[in-house]
Amino acid sequence: MTVNVSAVVLLAVLVVVCVKKGGLKAGHAVVCTLLGFYLASSSMAPAISEVAANLARLISGIKF
């Protein structure tokens, strides 16, 4: 659950920054949000979640 909440917060911040900087219009952000909702209810959701979890594990394992 922690990874999901962190990912949602990070993605929300990125969308807000993109909208503020003018690189992403509000309509585009709405379309991206709707795509996310439809993907979450699709049969691809478990695979997407697994990829995101694996990516989070990979990033957390990097030593700086």
Image: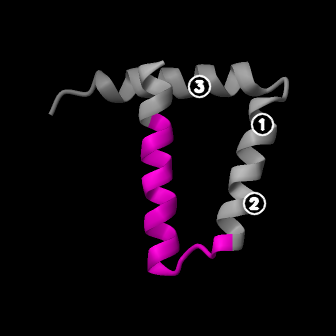
Residue 46 place in picture, x, y as percent: 71, 19
> Dot 1: within a 10 Å radius of its alpha carbon, few (fewer than 14), some, or many (20 or more) residues?
some
Residues at circles 2 and 3 in contact by the CB criterion of under 8 Å: no
What coloring was used for the rendering? one colour
Query: Does 14 appear above or below 18?
Result: above
Reply yes or no: does residue 25 show up in magenta: yes
Give the percent coordinates (x, y) of residue 57.
40, 20
Question: Label 3 neighbourhood size at 10 Å, few (<14), some (14-19), many (20+)?
Answer: few
Q: Residues within 10 Å of mark 2 (few under 14, many from 20)?
A: few
Mark number, residue 31: 2
Question: Residue at 65% of width from left, 63% of height from top?
Answer: 29
Q: Which residue is mark 3?
A: 51
Q: CA distance from mark 2 to mark 1?
A: 12 Å
Residue 56 magenta: no
Task: State the mark number for residue 39.
Answer: 1
Q: Label 1's element?
A: helix
Q: Position of residue 16 (x, y in %)?
A: 47, 63
User: Over which residues does the magenta segment extend?
Assistant: 7-26
Asked whether, in this view, residue 61 is left or right of residue 46, the answer is: left
What amino acid type is highlighted by mark number 3?
Val
Rendered image quadrant of residue 58: top left
Task: Using the image, determine if residue 26 lies above or below residue 2.
Answer: below
Q: Earlier in the sequence, mark 1 or mark 3?
A: 1
